[in-house]
Image (cartoon, rainbow, N blue to C red):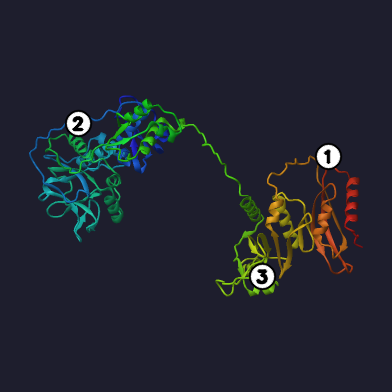
């Protein structure tokens, strides 16, 4: 809601803090301030009043009441003087008190419809309301001040009396500045003996509107069912300042004081208030407990301080810590609401940041921990996670010559075997996805079923670049803290333990590991090693090796040699100009010492040792 800084100041003798300071105070203890804007000699404060406080704070008096508590200064309420000397009466009837809790009206005669005084125009303009005429402007001004919406009818256009009732099906009304609406029984209206005068709580109609010719008026101040107003506003797609307030729980005891304030501002004698109020809302009691308040807030506020805070807020604290709640605070219904009030006024910033004690700290589930970590690493390496069925059919079984366990009562005649491995499914997934994508890299971490249930990590890549996929696997293991990995032609080992397989089928490179074995070797707390201050020396070598020796095995042997930092394979070739039984490979050897810069002689010795280790032959 838009609030006027000068309007708020009018409720206090003391000078208020700056608009910025007020915004800070409200943000810390009540509502967030969306923005501050200078407008003429005034300031706009756009305050985000929460729904539970809309009933008492969508008004300047309501916000002034909050500032009074937070700043420790007294609110000065407007003094009202009225003369109820007119003898005129108006019959008023409420058909259903659940629709309208209270309806208050007053008649004023011999009014002159004219422009409003400048000070009222200025207040309305700052709050975003256009000036219409003196009577309509006063009803809007009272709404901004008290939070109670009002309406004025032309008294001479009312036929008979006023009835608050549901509309009749097919009944029509033309609203002020709006089109004609067709009504039904779900809509509450204010009507005379002929037709509707207004849609209750939303907008007045043209039938009894105030015009320049109006001489006598009826002021209306009522309290309607919030749910009914909200439903009607949404249904008709009409949202007004009045409907916004009526959709909240406004204090029904406001209607009479709002009428009196409007009559006072008009400055003419009025009739006695015509007031229909059968189910009167009275203050209610809530018992509080100081220990419970302190326990909930995590502080130690004395009983005296709590009573002081509640008294400032307008509550009456009786003997036995019975709190009487004023009717304008309909958001306060349980002891916890009062605890919240004490906390926000005391100051959330004063509440110490202490964690509750944990007698049994949660234990890490390492199965989930390592699985999630492995999944994250695979995704960082460019793989997409997939999820396959736990069952396979005859095609996968026969294509890959799998030993399977058949399900006695399968859900489908096709999927009748428990999968013993995952990679056949991934190969098929890859083939299917290559219809839509140029490159596919997928993995699955899931269960397989052999003699016992196991968890495996399987992957497939849409090329036969064995070495590139191998580098991905090495990166995975390195990130899991596993360094003792070796590759043979089809097997992958940690030390001497076979943990998985790797191969190529139909141009697709695949791999599959027993994840439970990986998990046993994974290291969470890895030892920190500082980066060497000495440069890396790189040498590229090309030569011949026995074609039966796996490239991965060659790399593993070289990496075990002292001062070898890493090995990259950038070419493998068999064919023309390569002797039978041999293959040509090209390696990039990275060397580094932690103690010194390697000289040429030392590097040459290491290269010679590498060649001897792998039975290297120079190409002729």
Q: At 87% from the left edge and 60% from the top edge, which residue is drawn?
A: 543
Instruction: Check the image and report above or below for 111 versus 374.
Output: above
Alpha carbon distance from label 2 to label 1: 92 Å
Q: Is residue 514 left or right of residue 407?
A: right
Alpha carbon distance from label 3 to label 1: 55 Å
Alpha carbon distance from label 2 to label 3: 93 Å
Task: Decide: few, some or many residues near mark 3? Use Cα within 10 Å; few <14, some 14-19, many ≥20.
Answer: some
Secondary structure beneath disc 2?
loop
Q: Earlier in the sequence, mark 2 or mark 3?
A: 2
Q: Is residue 481 left or right of residue 351?
A: right
Q: Residue 248 appears at what percent x and percent y?
A: 30, 45
Secondary structure beneath disc 1?
loop
- Report the quarter where the C terminus lies: bottom right
Q: Earlier in the sequence, mark 2 or mark 1?
A: 2
Residue 401 versus residue 172: which sits nearer the camera? 401
Asked whether disc 2 touches disc 1, contact meaning CB atoms under 8 Å apart, the reply is no
Instruction: Check the image and report above or below for 411 versus 97.
Output: below
Q: Earlier in the sequence, mark 3 or mark 1?
A: 3
Farthest residue toward the left? 87
Q: Residue 299 appears at what percent x and percent y?
A: 45, 31
Residue 525 versus residue 586: which sits nearer the camera? 525
Q: Residue 487 appears at what percent x and percent y?
A: 78, 59
Please tell me the numbered disc located at residue 80: 2
Q: At 75% from the left edge and 41% from the top edge, which residue is drawn?
A: 529
Label 1, on which residue?
595
Mark 3 or mark 1, whichever is nearer to me: 3
Secondary structure beneath disc 3?
loop
Residue 38 seen from this side: no
Please tell me the numbered disc located at residue 404: 3
């Amino acid at each position: 809601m838009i609030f006027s800084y000068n309007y708020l100041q009018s409720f206090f003798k003391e000078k208020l803090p700056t608009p910025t300071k007020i915004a800070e105070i409200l943000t810390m203890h009540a509502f967030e301030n969306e923005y501050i804007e200078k407008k003429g000699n005034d300031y706009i404060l756009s305050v985000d009043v929460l729904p539970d406080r809309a009933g008492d704070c969508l008004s300047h008096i309501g916000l002034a009441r909050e500032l009074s508590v937070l700043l420790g200064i007294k609110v000065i309420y407007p003094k009202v003087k009225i003369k109820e000397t007119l003898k005129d009466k108006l019959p008023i009837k409420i058909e259903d008190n659940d629709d309208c809790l209270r309806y208050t009206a007053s008649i004023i005669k011999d009014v002159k419809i004219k422009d409003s005084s400048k000070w009222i125009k200025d207040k309305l303009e700052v709050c975003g309301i256009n000036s219409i005429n003196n009577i309509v402007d006063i009803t809007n001004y009272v709404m901004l001040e008290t939070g109670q919406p009002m309406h004025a009818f032309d008294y001479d256009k009312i036929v008979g009396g006023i009835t608050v009732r549901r509309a009749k099906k097919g009944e029509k009304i033309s609203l002020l500045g709006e089109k004609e609406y067709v009504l039904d029984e779900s809509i509450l209206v204010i009507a005379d003996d002929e037709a509707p005068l207004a849609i209750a709580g939303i907008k007045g109609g043209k039938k009894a509107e105030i015009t320049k010719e109006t001489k006598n008026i009826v002021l209306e101040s009522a309290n309607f069912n919030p749910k009914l107003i909200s439903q009607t506003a949404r249904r008709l797609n009409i949202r007004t300042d009045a409907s916004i307030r009526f959709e909240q729980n406004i204090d029904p005891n406001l209607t009479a004081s709002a009428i009196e304030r409007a009559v006072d501002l008009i400055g003419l004698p009025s009739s006695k208030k015509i007031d229909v109020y059968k189910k009167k809302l009275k203050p209610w009691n809530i018992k509080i407990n100081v220990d419970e308040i302190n326990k909930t807030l995590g502080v130690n506020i004395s009983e005296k301080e709590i009573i002081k805070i509640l008294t400032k807020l307008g509550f009456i604290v009786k003997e036995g810590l019975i709190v009487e709640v004023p009717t304008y605070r309909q958001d306060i219904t349980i002891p916890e609401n009062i605890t919240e009030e004490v906390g926000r006024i005391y100051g959330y910033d004063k509440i110490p940041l202490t964690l509750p004690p944990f007698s049994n700290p949660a234990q890490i589930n390492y199965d989930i921990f390592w699985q999630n970590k492995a999944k994250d690493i695979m995704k960082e390496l460019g793989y997409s996670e997939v999820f396959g069925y736990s069952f396979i059919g005859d095609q996968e079984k026969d294509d890959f010559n799998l030993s399977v366990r058949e399900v006695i009562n399968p859900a489908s005649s096709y999927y009748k075997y428990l999968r013993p491995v995952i990679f056949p499914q991934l190969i098929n997934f890859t083939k299917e996805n290559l219809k839509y994508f140029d490159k596919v890299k997928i993995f699955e971490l899931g269960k397989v079923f052999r003699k016992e249930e196991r968890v495996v990590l399987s992957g497939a890549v849409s090329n036969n670049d064995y070495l590139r996929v191998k580098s991905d696997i090495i990166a995975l293991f390195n990130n899991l803290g596993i360094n003792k990995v070796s590759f043979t032609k089809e097997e992958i080992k940690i030390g001497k333990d076979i943990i998985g397989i790797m191969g190529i089928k139909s141009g697709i490179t695949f791999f599959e590991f027993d994840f439970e074995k990986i998990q046993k070797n994974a290291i969470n707390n890895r030892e920190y090693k500082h980066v060497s201050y000495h440069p890396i020396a790189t040498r590229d070598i090309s030569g011949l090796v026995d074609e039966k020796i796996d490239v991965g095995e060659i790399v593993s042997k070289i990496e075990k040699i002292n001062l070898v930092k890493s090995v990259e394979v950038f070419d493998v070739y068999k064919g023309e100009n390569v002797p039978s039984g041999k293959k040509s490979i090209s390696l990039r050897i990275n060397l580094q010492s932690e103690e010194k810069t390697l000289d040429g002689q030392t590097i040459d010795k290491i290269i010679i040792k590498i060649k001897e280790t792998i039975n290297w032959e120079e190409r002729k």
